[in-house]
Image (cartoon, rainbow, N blue to C red):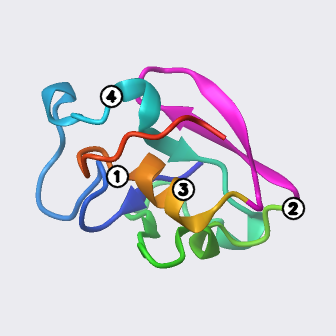
Amino acid sequence: MHVFVGEGVPFGMNRGVRFADVTDGTSNTIMVVEAGPNTADIWTKPGGLEFNADNPIEALGDIGESFLAVFMDGSAQSIPADVDATTLKNLLQHSDGTPVQRP
């Protein structure tokens, strides 16, 4: 399991995010994702998957037909690998003002 890191996602580079900061809604914001085995890292090493707003799915590596996502409300859902890049970007960003329905 991984988190995305970078600008605009809950695990940004500068500080943590409070639930009050998740203005798109906790049920509309991905917190943790299952990525492909080629993204494995030492579990004690700080880090995460680099967020690329133009192509967020690329960071997940070899995921097959779907990947598991855990949302900030604690729920989990399988997301198809062919999810639209804009939809995935909006699900990863917690306060972009564009809450979307889960795929």
Nearer the N terminus, badge 2 or badge 3?
Answer: 2
Which secondary structure lies at badge 3? Answer: helix
Q: What amino acid type is highlighted by mark number 4?
A: Gly
Which secondary structure lies at badge 2? Answer: loop
Which secondary structure lies at badge 4? Answer: loop
Name the residue that disc number 4 marks.
25
Determine whether 101 is above or below 59 in the image: above
Tell whether label 2 touches label 4 (CB within 8 Å). Answer: no
Mark 1 crowd level (few <14, some 14–19, many ≥20, 10 Å Cα): many
Name the residue that disc number 3 marks.
88
Tell whether label 3 touches label 2 (CB within 8 Å). Answer: no
Name the residue that disc number 2 marks.
64
Mark 4 crowd level (few <14, some 14–19, many ≥20, 10 Å Cα): many
Nearer the N terminus, badge 4 or badge 3?
Answer: 4
Determine whether 19 is above or below 98 in the image: above
Q: What amino acid type is highlighted by mark number 3?
A: Leu
Which secondary structure lies at badge 1? Answer: loop
Q: Which percent across, then down, holds residue 3?
A: 45, 53
Q: Nearer the viewer, mark 2 or mark 3?
A: 3
Nearer the N terminus, badge 1 or badge 4?
Answer: 4
Q: Quadrant of residue 95?
A: top left
Is 83 placed left or right of 29 in the picture?
right
